[in-house]
Amino acid sequence: MTNNTPTQKKILRLSAIANRIGQIINEKTSGKRFWMKAEVSSSHQNANGHTYFDFVEMQHGRQVAKLRGMIWRDDRARIEKEFAQAGIEFKLENGKEITTECTIEYHPVFGISVNVVDADPNFALGEIERIRRQMLLKLEKEGLFETNKQIPLPLLLKRIGVVTSKGSAGHQDFAKTIAGSKYPIYVKIEDARMQGHRTERTVLSAITSLENQSLDLIVVLRGGGSKLDLGALDNELIARKIASCSVPVWTAIGHEIDESVLDYVSHTNFKTPTAVAEEILNRMNVLATKNKDGLSQLRSAWSKRVTQEKNNNQKQKQIFAQRIESKVSKSNVLIQTQRNRLRLSVSKRVSVNERRRISQFSFSFQQKAKDKLKTLQQELRLAKNNTHSATKDRKNDAFQKLNRAKTRLRDVTKRQLRDRGLMLVSSRGWFSPGRILSKVNSNRDVLLVRAGDFKKRANRKITDERYSIKSKQIKVHPGLIRERLKSKRAQLKLGRTIIDSRDPAKNLKRGYALIFDSNSKLVTSIEDLTKNQNVKINLADGVAAAKIGETEQDDS
């Protein structure tokens, strides 16, 4: 008889299978820890402070692995404390890759989960630095390191905008130093958060506001702090805003060792807010000293020039006076000679009585002539004093005109004396005192008119010379000279700034290096290098020799 009873199947309950799986996993992983690098996804924290998330791994945009992860509240508090001591913040942000020390745990209901018991702050620091370096390289390739540096600084920094947290230590240090200045400096403060998630928005808003207020300089201030606090300013959008700003931007961000990203794109960077304020005041002091020295030199040169002109004028005045006196003396001698000749000629032709009358007339005529001559001499001396600044050519012209006038006067006098002598011979009536006085007065009027014309011409020439001197004084006015000096100094400052910005030595001091192959040719691409190739690395303080190992092409 055939037994058709079916074979009895062994059926297990789900809990038994789950417990067996847990036993196997626990046997292999119990008490064991391992370090794992993975990306965080779907992170959230419950009311008890425990954090749940997923560990995922992506390759070429596709998820290739996924495990449930969690951190107990106490473990997270301890990890956050360790990270804070290292100067960074422990965050479980979606899409962020972290390195953690983990254990495996299996639960019959919740399945396999990865418990995070520790994290590596060094990895986090390295990741932050990698992102920072990528940001710096990107900004440098776009030429943004030099954009703001090429904006020329005004000679006088009198209107300054400050981006800082009002009331902070950095703000107080800057304000205290500026307040101790003797110069009238206008400072406009724009309040901004210098750490935390609001840093980007508030700093960008502050710089935009200050850029539109006709300022000479914008300063971004932040006192000392940890890398965690200062890291918020390593921001690409803020760096681009500073680089494109139409006003020179100085930074004073309290990094202890490294420079901030903003330091690279700013016009000039300083270590502390106090150093910024001291540099502003130092520029004021230097400019004030230069202006004082320039003014002193200008006054000295002007005083010397005025003294020289006074001496020259005095010499010309003396020469002019000597020539006038010489001409007058010669004229007096000539008139006296002619008078003596006339007297001798008349005396031979007239009687004793007539000689006596002629002598009396001659004596009276001489007295009047002497008085007239004294009057002319006084007028000539006055004209001489008023024409001390006339040029040599104009003086010669005046001398010639004076000589011609004296010659005409001498000729007129000579003719008059001759006519008087002839008239005395023919008639005693010609020598009446009234007629002689009338003639003398007539001649005096003629001489006065001529002397007045001469004085007017001399005054006109003196006025022209004064206008000429005044126009020369305007050309050397201190204000015009200061403006020219200001323009030249601005051009020199711009040239110096451009030269400094292109100096390779400064890039080396910032931590960059230059690589040369065995032929001393600069290496600019990974394609120029081969395995085991000997190269030289130029640093800021020396040269190192190296050999190339493996090379890796940058996919970006």
Image (cartoon, rainbow, N blue to C red):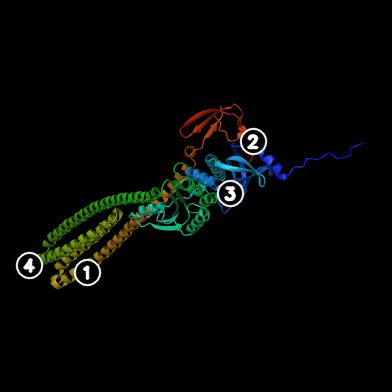
Q: Amino acid at mark 4?
A: Asn
Q: Amino acid at mark 1?
A: Asp
Q: Position of residue 66 (x, y in %)?
A: 66, 44
Closer to us: 443 or 208: 208
Mark 3 and mark 4: Cα distance apart in space: 153 Å
Label 4: which residue?
353
Tell which circle, 1 or 2, labels the residue nearer the N-terminal end. 2
Tell which circle, 1 or 3, labels the residue nearer the N-terminal end. 3
Mark 1 and mark 3: Cα distance apart in space: 124 Å
Q: Quadrant of residue 118?
A: top right
Asked if residue 536 is positioned above or below residue 299 in the image, the reply reads above
Closer to us: 171 or 25: 25
Callout in the foreground (1, 2): 2
Callout in the foreground (2, 3): 2
Q: Secondary structure at mark 1?
A: helix
Tell which circle, 2 or 4, labels the residue nearer the N-terminal end. 2
What number is the disc on residue 51?
3
Quadrant in the picture for the N terminus:
top right
